[in-house]
Amino acid sequence: MIKPPNLVPVIAIDGPTASGKGTIAQRVALALGWHVLDSGALYRLAAWLVLDRNADANDIDQVALLARRMDVKFEGTQTFMSGVDVTELIRQEHVGNLASRLAPHAALREALLDRQRAFRVLPGLVADGRDMGTVVFPDAPLKIFLTADVHARTARRCHQLRERGEFPDEKAVFLDLQMRDERDMQRTVAPLKPAVDAHALDSSTLTVDQTVDHVLALWRALPANLIGKN
Ligand code: DC
């Protein structure tokens, strides 16, 4: 039987670590009055839970089960796990690193799939991650592949860390980003890569406002008869 098309519009924004996807997704969602999905937060939450429970990160079935059952709530910019505010905790570098090590496993990705798709509700969704356009929302009417060169991303990540009161070692941040890119792109399941119908957008020399305007212009330029477009 042919599945009817999903009428809820999605803008998928994929790209490497620290490319600015999160900020751009939030801002585009705000401009359109849509919902937002930070899919990386789900991988970070799974990683945090593994650490918090002292679970065996190598036991992927157990990790997937924990991820399937985790009690997560997003409220504005805050993230709660079983009622506890974990917004800052899941942003720690070691949590991101474990998320990146767990993310290649198909069982974990499968466990998080329905949870991600459940964010697709009216009036629309802006979803950011690595496989939004290729796997999670392959029918998204607009797909963006947001990049920035590794030096620009290193500078942005160091700036973020300093704002949090940390003292980042630039060389270590640079090497860490390169390692994560490599891992995200080389994995066999849902690797980081542009969907065939994605628009590539290099934000290395663009401001946040310019990047947001570009995405909104692409959305507005889509044919008016496009399903669900408001
Ligand atoms: O975007 P982020 O850095 O918060 O994501 C944390 C990790 O989760 C990242 O190393 C890759 C992984 N991830 C993924 O594999 N697929 C996604 N859709 C989002 C994140």
Image (spheres, rainbow, N blue to C red):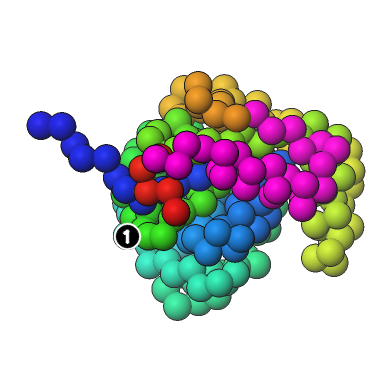
- Please name the residue shown 32% across and 60% down the image: 69
Q: Is residue 58 shown to the viewer in this render?
A: no
Above or below: residue 50 compared with residue 82:
above
Report x, y in % for residue 54: 48, 58
User: Helix, strand, or loop for circle 1?
Assistant: helix
- Please name the residue shown 56% across and 44% down the image: 220
Residue type indicated by callout 1: Arg
Report x, y in % for residue 101: 55, 38
Q: Is residue 113 magenta?
A: no
| Closer-to-camera residue (36/61) | 36
Numbered range of the magenta stretch:
200-225
Q: Is residue 224 magenta?
A: yes
Q: Is residue 178 left or right of residue 225?
A: right
Report x, y in % for residue 115: 35, 54
The residue singled out by tag 1 in the image is 69
- Please name the residue shown 82% across and 48% down the image: 207
